[in-house]
Image (spheres, rainbow, N blue to C red):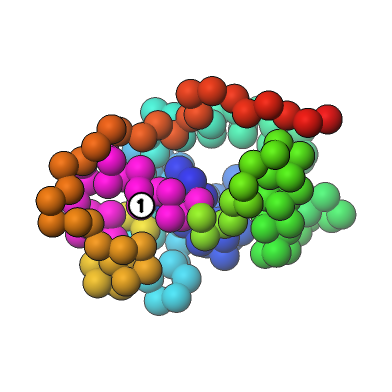
Amino acid sequence: AMFTGCRTSELLRLRVDAKENEPGHITPEHLHLGRRSKHGVNPYALVGEEFRDMLKHFRAWQKKTESKWFFPSPIDSKKTIQPEALNRALKRICKSMSLDLITPHGLRSYYVTKRRSDGANDIQIAAEIGDKTVNLMQTTYGSRPANWSGGKALSWIPVKKPNVKR
């Protein structure tokens, strides 16, 4: 979600056995998402360097699951996880790492903030997250201030790992 700006409902449709133009099909530049939720547009997510690296590790893990889903259910690997499972997992992980709560929508919001820090304009970002209009994106995530100078570019990967309580 952080690398794509996708909604959970869009990610849960992804299958590793996807053919071209099916949800889950990956090219070097794009991840095909299929239809967007909430009548969104643009069925593709960009695949950048860090996302490509994450996908490499994902594929190694996924081979062990023997599931066709990107997010297999731990109860029945023939099914995808339930939509609320991501939220519960984030709550559990944030608590164990003494982090403020991160929600699936917070990951989508981070994508918008990250892409703005990269210098992408709001028209491009709205298209990337599948919003029909720039106004819809700006209403949800705020408008870029008129005097915005870009600031320091954010990273997809944390510079310092948080202390983990075990």
Look at the numbered disc 1 and give the secondary structure of its residue. helix
Q: Amino acid at mark 1?
A: Val
What residue sits 69% from the left and 32% below the top? 61
Quick check: 13 above or below 37? above
What residue sits 44% from the left and 29% below the top? 50
Residue 147 located left or right of residue 15: left
What residue sits right under mark 1 in the picture? 112
Residue 141 located left or right of residue 17: left
The quadrant the C terminus occupies is top right
Q: In the picture, residue 16 is in which quadrant?
A: top right
**Can residue 113 be seen in the rendering of this structure?**
yes
Predominant SS of the magenta segment: helix
Q: In the picture, residue 47 is in which quadrant?
A: top left
Give residue 57's position: percent from left, percent from top. Answer: 60, 28
**Count of labels in the image:** 1
- For the residue pair 114 and 128, the one nearer the viewer reads as 114
Q: Indicate whether residue 95 is drawn in magenta.
A: no
**Can residue 63 be seen in the rendering of this structure?**
no
Q: Indicate whether residue 115 is drawn in magenta.
A: yes
Q: Which residues are magenta?
A: 107-126
Q: Residue lying furthest right in this view?
A: 75
